[in-house]
Image: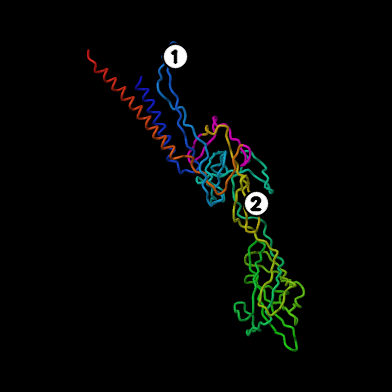
């Protein structure tokens, strides 16, 4: 009997050493939770045997119990690196259509080629859907969505009106080249650019070229300028005429054009829809002896916003910002908790699935009752303490050696008995 008692101790110690080795192997695995081997004694008894005469039959591994204590929190520069400070698991699915939900504490997420937020294994992070105001509209597991970043935001608005206020240098000379050529800087004095947009939201450059036509004289104190306007390579016209004349009085105040310039419709290479722009020189447009400058410019077009960044707050709200100034709430990170987390089934890759022992997942959001806060730009590392595990490994090794010694002693006793001669 002592052989099998010692053998059970050896097997139990070997299991403990394997558990500790597994813990040590995953000391750098993000979201990993260590396990602890727990033992129970084995007693063989019968109703006819006195309690004081019972002899144990060894040890048995009762459980490899997972320890869900908080791991080390490691700072990062990625806003999609998430960590739960407290209780809760991230919910992930293998893909957007899958009904399988796994749970993890490893919040190292990134964006895949289809703009889904995924972990290193490609599983999709699950969020609760929200409306336009950012209010969660559903909280069930069947309502959860795979978090996907939109590519654009907003509706494009074509430019219809442009306003510019400039100062033209009163000391500018009349260009020696009589014929205007936008590729020849000597044929005009100054130019100014304004970004405008077509019906598809494509950015275009409106360039105004200013060419002095006449300077003031003793007989005539006024002066005039010609303005030629181009959108890309397309010259804008008014009633099919090219160019607009600007005039200034002796004080440098603009006297013409007195009204908005209504350019003819034009079509650019980036759009098939005709577009018409009204151009207005601001009331502050002057001709003074100071250098040419654009005091102000504005236009009423709007491009489609391109996504520029994503942030996640402590409550798990995912916010996206766009180049046109728009912001969108994309969802709220879904967290799950269990009545008995130690009963979760380990799947590898820091994944767990629910079992009858763990109970069904209780879903919720960060920083609410039963769930910890969400930390963006942070990764939860392993909760393995190397020093503690090494001490445990030494103790397990001593237990193994002690059981080996007991087995060897039992063998020597048996051998002595076998060698007894009458």
Q: CA distance from mark 2 to mark 1?
A: 72 Å
Q: Nearer the viewer, residue 7 or 116?
A: 7
Q: Is residue 293 left or right of residue 219?
A: left
- Nearest the eye: 387 or 86: 387
Q: Looking at the magenta stretch, what is its main secondary structure?
A: loop
As for residue 347 lying within the magenta part, the answer is yes
Q: Position of residue 44 (x, y in %)?
A: 42, 17
Which quadrant, please, contains the N terminus?
A: top left
Classify 63 as above or below 1. Answer: below
The residue that appears at 42% across and 40% down in the rendered structure is 25
First of labels 2, 1 by sequence position = 1
Q: Which residues are magenta?
A: 345-369
Q: On screen, 417 above or below 63? A: above
| Image quadrant in which you'd find residue 371 | top right
- For residue 221: magenta? no
Q: Is residue 34 left or right of residue 188?
A: left
| Quarter of the image that includes the C terminus | top left
Mark 2 residue element? strand
Do the CB atoms of the residues marked 2 and 1 lie less than 8 Å apart? no
> Percent position (x, y) of residue 91?
57, 41
Residue most extreme to the top = 48
The residue tagged 1 is: 51
The location of residue 162, given as percent across then percent down, is: 70, 68
Q: How is the image coloured?
A: rainbow
Q: Which mark is residue 178?
A: none
Q: Where does label 2 land, which residue?
A: 328
Does dot 1 land on a helix, a strand or a loop?
helix
Position above or below: 164 against 307: below
- Comparing 95 with 293, the one in front is 293
Counting from the top left corner in percent of width and height, residue 262 is at 74, 71
Q: Residues within 10 Å of mark 1 (few under 14, many from 20)?
A: few
């Amino acid at each position: 009997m002592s052989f099998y008692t010692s053998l059970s101790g050896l097997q139990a110690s070997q299991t403990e050493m394997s558990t500790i080795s597994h813990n040590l192997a995953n000391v750098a695995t993000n979201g990993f939770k260590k396990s602890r081997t727990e033992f129970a004694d084995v007693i063989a008894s019968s109703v006819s045997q006195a309690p004081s005469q019972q002899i144990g039959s060894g040890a048995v591994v009762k459980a490899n119990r997972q320890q869900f204590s908080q791991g080390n929190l490691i700072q990062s520069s990625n806003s999609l690196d998430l960590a739960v400070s407290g209780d809760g698991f991230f919910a992930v699915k293998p893909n957007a259509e899958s009904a399988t939900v796994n749970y993890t504490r490893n919040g190292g997420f990134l964006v895949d080629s289809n703009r889904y937020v995924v972990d290193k294994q490609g599983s999709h992070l699950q969020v609760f859907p929200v409306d336009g105001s950012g209010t969660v509209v559903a909280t069930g597991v069947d309502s959860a969505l795979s978090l996907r970043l939109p590519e654009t935001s907003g509706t494009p608005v074509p430019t219809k009106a442009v306003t510019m206020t400039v100062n033209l240098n009163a000391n500018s000379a009349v260009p020696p080249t009589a014929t205007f050529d936008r590729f020849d800087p000597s044929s005009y004095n100054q130019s100014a650019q304004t970004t405008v947009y077509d019906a598809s939201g494509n950015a275009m450059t409106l360039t105004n070229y200013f060419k002095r036509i006449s300077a003031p004289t003793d007989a005539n104190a006024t002066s005039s300028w010609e303005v030629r306007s181009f959108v890309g390579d397309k010259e804008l016209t008014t009633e099919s005429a090219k160019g607009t004349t600007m005039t200034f009085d002796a004080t440098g105040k603009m006297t013409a054009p007195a009204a908005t310039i209504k350019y003819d419709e034009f079509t650019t290479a980036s759009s098939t829809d005709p577009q018409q722009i009204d151009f207005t020189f601001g009331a502050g447009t002057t001709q003074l002896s100071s250098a040419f400058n654009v005091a102000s410019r504005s236009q009423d077009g709007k491009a489609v916003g391109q996504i520029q960044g994503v942030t996640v707050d402590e409550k798990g709200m995912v916010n996206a910002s766009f180049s046109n100034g728009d912001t969108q709430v994309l969802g709220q990170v879904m967290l799950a908790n269990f009545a008995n987390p130690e009963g979760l089934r380990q799947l590898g890759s820091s994944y767990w699935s629910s079992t009858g022992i763990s109970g069904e997942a209780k879903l919720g959001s960060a920083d609410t009752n039963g769930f910890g806060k969400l930390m963006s730009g942070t990764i939860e590392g392993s909760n393995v303490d190397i020093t503690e595990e090494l001490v445990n490994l030494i103790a397990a090794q001593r237990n193994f050696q002690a059981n080996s010694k007991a087995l060897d002693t039992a063998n020597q006793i048996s051998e002595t008995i076998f060698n007894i001669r009458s």
